[in-house]
Image (tube, helix red, strand yellow):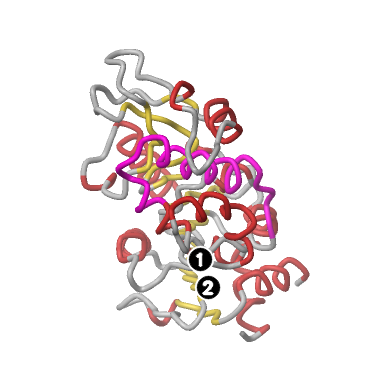
Amino acid sequence: MRVDDLRRIRQALDTADLVLIGASNGLDMAEGLNIFAPDAHFAEAYGDLAQACGARSVLEGMYRSRGNLAQAWAWQARFACREWLDYNPGAVMEPLRKLVGQTDHFVLTCNTDARFMRAGFDEAFVMQTEGTVARMVCSASCCDERHASAEAVRALDASIAEGAVDLRLIPACPHCGAPLTLAVDEMRLQHPDSEIAGQMDVLRDLLARRRGGNIVVLELGVGLRNGVIKQLLARTAAGEPNLTYAIFNYNQVVFPQGLEARCVGVDGDMAQAFETMARL
């Protein structure tokens, strides 16, 4: 990474009228959470669950446990507790929040761990395209009602024994009695709920009010396979005359077609990049 590129991004942020942030798994990885790997964090936080079902990553554990309610909730509760409730803003998120400051902003993220809110971002301006562990919904889909999850996941995590939660502690839908589940849905944008629709209105309003101003896009760890976030960002930014489009990634810095001249690529350690920008 080049300091001149980081300085250009920092200067753009300092004069921005609107900051658009897109984030995927690469952001979590930069702060030590890799849901695909059997690393030290996985062993420490999920070792007992992994031993019970043979999983070698968080993602595999979630998949293997899907047919067993008590085991599935064990993985959900542990993930929510460790990666959301126990999370403190790290080497990327803390300087990111300070760099954005009071500037108008909007976040698009497929990460479900609700870390942007833990870092102080307003949930009204954070579109979680695959849902969030901070809410629960009816597993039978009898309604769209969403319920806070913090108290339930703490109790369920504390009850885990031999890779499973105490079934008696799983909360039930107040309308139909079916078990609640975390509000995580990778197809959420394909059938948007009222919250997504409302946030799209918020984004359109921000863009209308700041059109023609200094717009900064920060694409944080969005891999080539996550076309949804990349396409949303590129489509949203297209046509803005005063645009700085910054892409932070590790070996996957790809500029959106047609916006190349306004892009800055930062290939390497995202945490180091944000630490440097905070000092500039």
Find residue 235 and report its horizontal and vertical position in percent.
30, 62
In the image, 95 versus 158, the foreground residue is 158
Q: Main secondary structure of the magenta part?
A: helix
In the orientation shown, which residue stands out farthest toward the top? 175
Q: Secondary structure at mark 2?
A: strand
Residue type at mark 1 is: Leu
Left or right? Give the position of 57 relative to 44.
Answer: left
Q: Which residues are magenta?
A: 62-90
Residue type at mark 2 is: Phe
Report the quarter where the C terminus lies: bottom right
Which of pointers 1 and 2 lies earlier in the amino acid sequence?
1
Report the quarter where the N terminus lies: bottom right
Report, in whole angstroms, how far the alpha carbon at label 1 lies from the one at label 2.
5 Å
Residue at which label 1 appears: 220
Question: In which image quadrant can residue 118 be found?
Answer: top right
In the orientation shown, which residue stands out farthest toward the right? 279
From this viewpoint, is residue 109 visible?
no
- Does 155 appear in magenta? no
- Does 69 appear in magenta? yes
Please tell me which residue is depicted at 35% across the width and 73% down the height of the picture: 224
Find residue 164 and report its horizontal and vertical position in percent.
47, 38
In the image, 180 versus 121, the foreground residue is 180
Please tell me which residue is depicted at 40% across the width and 50% down the height of the picture: 62
Q: State yes or no: discs 1 and 2 in contact (Cβ < 8 Å).
A: yes
Residue at which label 2 appears: 248
Residue 181 vertical placement versus 275 (above, below): above
